[in-house]
Image (cartoon, rainbow, N blue to C red):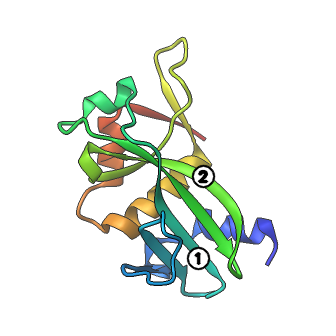
């Protein structure tokens, strides 16, 4: 699998094509969640290791529960880390959202389409339909820039 093919898996797949693994006796000690891509079992994700805890930016104050933390996500192919990103667990863990660019002159917290799609996938794998990703994105007053 090439990196571009892996990128397509991450950006074009939906949560139904992933199997969340809740108990990971073999996992890295600092991640607390994982998923495997059901159409190619060599592709996995692990996430949860703290980047900044607590995480606080102006946009995270828009949520009823202001507790937020940023965490690492590692994508693995055949057990090797091939991609790393960081996301935010916002509203006390109800939403997984992308980290936006710093507020611009227009007062916008901008998120790229790729960051949006990846965070939406991980949110769906982690939280299912309990909380709407779009609802969290809008509550954070984030702006999508495709």
Residue lying at 71% horizontally and 82% vertically, measured from the top left: 78
Real-space CA distance between mark 2 and mark 1, rounded to the nearest whole angstrom: 14 Å
- Give the residue pinned by disc 2: 85
Residue lying at 34% horizontally and 35% vertically, measured from the top left: 140
Q: Is residue 26 above or below residue 51?
A: below
| Most foreground residue, 20 or 72 | 72
Residue lying at the far front in this picture: please name it.
Answer: 29
Q: Is residue 61 above or below residue 80?
A: above
Residue lying at the far left in this picture: please name it.
Answer: 64
Residue 146, given in percent of the width and then of the height, sits at: 60, 41
All told, the count of numbered labels is 2
Quadrant of the rendered image containing residue 43: bottom right
Q: Is residue 40 left or right of residue 133?
A: right
Residue lying at the far right in this picture: please name it.
Answer: 2
Disc 1: CA contacts within 10 A as few (<14), some (14-19) or many (>=20)? many
Q: Is residue 64 left or right of residue 60?
A: left
Residue 116, given in percent of the width and then of the height, sits at: 52, 48
- Give the residue pinned by disc 1: 44
Residue lying at 35% horizontally and 49% vertically, measured from the top left: 134
């Amino acid at each position: 699998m090439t990196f571009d093919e892996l990128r397509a898996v991450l950006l074009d797949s939906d949560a139904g094509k992933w199997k969340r693994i809740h108990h990971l006796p073999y996992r890295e000690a600092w991640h607390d969640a994982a998923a495997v891509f059901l159409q190619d079992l060599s592709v996995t994700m692990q996430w949860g290791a703290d980047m900044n805890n607590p995480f606080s930016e102006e946009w995270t104050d828009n949520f009823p529960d202001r507790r937020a933390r940023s965490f690492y996500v590692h994508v693995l192919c055949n057990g090797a880390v091939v991609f790393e990103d960081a996301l935010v667990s916002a509203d006390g863990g109800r939403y997984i959202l992308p980290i936006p660019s710093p507020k611009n002159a227009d007062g916008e917290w901008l998120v790229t389409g790729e960051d949006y799609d990846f965070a939406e996938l991980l949110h769906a794998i982690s939280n299912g339909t309990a909380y709407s990703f779009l609802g969290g994105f809008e509550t954070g007053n984030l702006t999508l820039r495709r």
